[in-house]
């Protein structure tokens, strides 16, 4: 906590280089990454719902007739 207060009071933040525009929250790169993440979460939810609504058949070993 004291490190952060010293960082602000000593104005050390002025010596730090700004983040490149490529990595800004509103950049095309970050917007694309956000869209991919949202798509993956949507697919994950759809797969979960499909598994709950239409579960796959349980594997049963073949029954051999007894002789």
Image (spheres, rainbow, N blue to C red):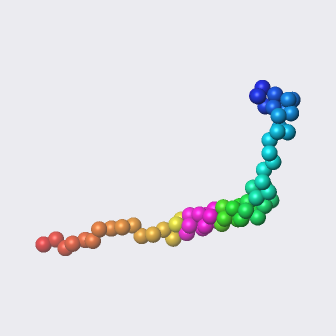
Q: Is residue 60 above or below residue 11?
A: below
Residue 59 vs residue 13, the one in the foreground: 13
Q: Quadrant of the N terminus?
A: top right
Q: Residue at x 27, y 71 (%)?
A: 62
Residue lying furthest top? 2
15 with respect to 30 (left or right): right
The picture places residue 19, in percent across and down from the top left corner, at 78, 50
The picture places residue 44, in percent across and down from the top left corner, at 59, 63
Magenta segment's dominant SS is helix
The picture places residue 39, in percent across and down from the top left corner, at 66, 66
Residue 39 vs residue 16, the one in the foreground: 16
40 with respect to 60 (left or right): right
Q: Residue at x 45, y 69 (%)?
A: 56
Magenta-drawn segment:
40-50
Q: Quadrant of the C terminus?
A: bottom left
Residue 1 vs residue 10, the one in the foreground: 10
- Count of labels shown? 0
Q: Can residue 38 be seen in the rendering of this structure?
A: no
Q: Can residue 15 be seen in the rendering of this structure?
A: yes
Residue 44 vs residue 29, the one in the foreground: 29
1 drawn magenta: no
Q: Is residue 10 above or below residue 40?
A: above
Q: Quadrant of residue 4?
A: top right
């Amino acid at each position: 906590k004291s490190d952060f207060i010293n960082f602000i009071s000593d104005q050390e933040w002025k010596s730090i280089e700004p983040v490149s525009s490529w990595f800004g929250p509103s950049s095309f790169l970050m917007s694309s990454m956000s869209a991919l993440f949202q798509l993956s979460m949507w697919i994950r939810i759809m797969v979960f719902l499909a598994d709950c609504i239409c579960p796959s058949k349980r594997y049963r070993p073949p029954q051999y007739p007894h002789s």
